[in-house]
Amino acid sequence: MSRHRRKVIYLLGFMGSGKSTVGNLLASALGWPLIDLDTVIEAGQGLSIREIFENSGEPFFRQIERAALTEASKAEPAVIALGGGTFAQPPNLDLIREAGGTTVWLDCPPEVLRARCHGMENRPLFRDEQSFTQLFLERLPFYRLADFRIATEGRKPEEVVEQILSLRVF
Ligand code: S3P
């Protein structure tokens, strides 16, 4: 099947990788709307991500995350900032591939991510250093499937945006 690359950019990466910050700047630079999946989920449930995990557990969160992703993927043009786990769920990967956009992985070493997430209350999957790194390693094989990888360590969000724009795939 010949595919037209839809004007949709999925930003993926682990917690703290800057998906929302970069997404905001990238969307402004392109003049496209930003769809921040976690924000959409929170608005839809009227609850914070932490409350959703506490009240209903991760399997329920993944269910509504998938529904939000399905809906978001209909938009074009759009910058879609995924949650840290979205791209590591195989059914979501299929959905994103089918949607025909561009996937960009914001890569950053786990120790930098850990420092950024430290003390943040709305990340139920950030429990301790060991499980954080373990989860990071489990997800790497998925993140590596992205169309593009951008190294973000030591770079300002604006520089990351410039680099994404220089990919010139859309
Ligand atoms: C999650 C990351 C969070 C949020 C939820 C689950 C994960 O998003 O979707 O807490 O599985 O890594 P951020 O990556 O924006 O923190």
Image (cartoon, rainbow, N blue to C red):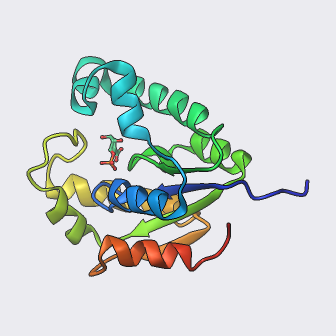
Seen in the picture, residue 55 relative to 165 is either above or below; the reply is above
Q: In which image quadrant can residue 75 be found?
A: top right
Residue 25: x and y in percent read 40, 62
- Residue 138 in view, yes or no: no
Residue 162 x %, y %:
46, 77
Residue lying farthest right? 1
- Residue 33 image offset from top left, x and y in percent: 51, 47
Picture residue at 14% right of the left edge, 65% below the top: 115
Which quadrant of the frame does ligand 1 lie within?
top left
Picture quadrant where residue 118 is located:
bottom left
Q: How many marks?
A: 0
- Viewer-proximal residue among 107 and 100: 100
The residue located at (46%, 26%) in the rendering is: 64
Quadrant of the snapshot with the C terminus: bottom right
For residue 44, side relative to residue 128 (left or right): right
Quarter of the image holding residue 39?
A: top left
- Asked if one can make out residue 29 in the rendered structure from this viewpoint, the answer is yes
Above-or-below relation of 101 to 94: below
Closer to the camera, 101 or 94? 101
Left or right: where 161 falls relative to 108: right
Residue 83 at what x, y percent from top left?
A: 40, 46
